[in-house]
Amino acid sequence: MLSYGSYIDGREHPAQQWVYTVRASAMLRDFFGSFRLKRGLEQGRIRPEDTGDEVIGRCAVADRHDVEAAVRSAARAAAEWSTAPLATRMRLIEVFHDLVREKHDEIVELMIAEGHPRSLARWEAAGMLANTAAPTREFLAGQLEHQVRTAGRELTVRRVADGVVCLNPPQNATVANALLGVWVLAAGNALVVRAPRSAPLGVMHVLRELIAPALEAVGAPAAALSVLCSDARATLEQWLQDPLVDDIMYFGGSEQGVAFGAACVAHGKKPVLELAGNDICVVWHDADLDLAAEALAESFLGSGQICMVPNCAVVHPRVADALLEKLCERARRIRPGFPEAADALLSPVLRTDTFFDVLHQALAGGARLVAGGRRLDVDGEQDDTGGLFLEPTVVRVDGLKGARDLDAVRHETFFPLLPVVVPEDGRDDDELLAAVVAFVNGNEYGLRNSLWTSDDSVVDRWLAGVRNGGLLKVNDSHVGFLPVLPTHGGTGLTGGPGGEANYPVLRTSHLQGVSVARDVRRPSAAVFGDSAEEATV
């Protein structure tokens, strides 16, 4: 069984209270028995040595004094680490990348044990590698520092670390999002991560086994990284009040996140917000429908409980029927299962009542159910009372006008429900494309948008017109990660005011210009330019 105390100042800190992690498949087989086991361990009624392999680990619960100590330790480390050369900080990313590759299977298996379906865990691990690959490192190194020599001067535009950055990952994708913190460190910041009490083990493990050794390998102070498991509300409030905290990376819902961002600004902190997504995928009449249907089926990865899956499709009326047939065929083949299964794709959904509320509102508003709509057990059988899974569900919505009156279209839904909006027929393609682009730009959220078409002129018009979103993709997987391109961030309710594509190394640093004169005889030359010879000061 893995066991992690709070990690502060390069050392493990003991605790009187622990959070235990029970294997997700055990919870699915016997939820109440597994819950009693977990609660018995945490209350001290059951000894850890008396449990079997269904208990995979434990994490110490930090108190407010631990949270304060972590920030103090980070502030001391930031003063040292921020002076490290850029080459050293980028070497950190390279070492981390190599460790992820080396420990890939171990990371995937731990995420599966915590409840991520195998396909989802593999996708998350692929993102870690793409996000730190050599092309990405080279691109971001160029963004962090640019130098020119002119008129006897060395001129540098560089990004300087903000200082102490606190990261609060989401509960649905804790490991992958916590590991974004390695780029926070590459900017020269010190990092404090709060592992969610609902799923702390994976975060504790990967930060201790991947980032901590990478820091050691490049000679960084161990105190540059702190990891602790603590209460969310109390810790966020403590970070807000602490004058040593500079930035807070917050993941969560849009309403709460925008309010938290405003609180950060009021307390003199920089908020880096990763909020909800409501991604749109557009399928034009000349698209490869088989590939487009494959990409749209990504909507059901992790039961749609991922912010960057397609959340709404807009399909040209000429091919809507054919695409829906292909999409529904794929959706019906997606079944529940234990997360260890090779083809596992769906996760349990806790908010099933909300799913049915949204579905029924859509159907009452004129949408048509074309696939799914049932609650299932782990074996894929219909279970209307205790089923923890939802059948991948597709509804058809006719007409752009009024489509956003439906919550399924207007808001992020976070369950396996994909509305397919079919614009009104009868317009020519130029007019229809303009209307579709306007519909995409009218989305209140702005994480990712994608397009399927074989017409380069349509691609050009779509790319020129769409301003919504932090990432645009054409004829490609909607969720797939690629080197150089951002993985997170966006506009509107996705990133809050000032939201954009998010490279954490850039968002947690600030621009600074530097001029070092090496061969300047008269400072007045910088004041008066070419007329300096005639000017007097």
Image (cartoon, helix red, strand yellow):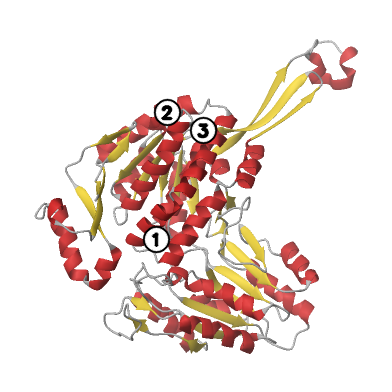
Residue 188 appears left or right of 428: left
Alpha carbons under labels 1 and 3: distance apart: 28 Å
**Location of residue 374 with respect to 140 vertically, above or below:** below
Task: Indicate the quadrant where residue 506 lies.
Answer: top right
Taking depth in this image into account, of 260 and 116 the one nearest to the observer is: 116
N-terminal-most mark, 2 or 1? 1
N-terminal-most mark, 1 or 3? 1
Residue 144: give x, y in percent of width and height: 62, 36
Give the residue at x 67% y 70%: 451
Query: Which numbered marker is on residue 172?
Result: 1
Residue 354: give x, y in percent of width and height: 37, 75
N-terminal-most mark, 3 or 2? 3
Query: Which numbered marker is on residue 298?
Result: none
In this figure, which residue is indicated by the disc labeled 2? Answer: 221
In this figure, which residue is indicated by the disc labeled 3? Answer: 188
**Mark 2: few, some, or many residues within 10 Å (few <14, many ≥20)?**
some
Q: Are marks 2 and 1 in contact (CB under 8 Å)?
A: no
| Kind of residue at badge 3 | Gly
**Mark 3: few, some, or many residues within 10 Å (few <14, many ≥20)?**
many
| Kind of residue at badge 2 | Pro
Element under label 2?
loop
Closer to the observer: label 2 or label 1?
A: 2
Looking at the image, can residue 275 be seen?
no
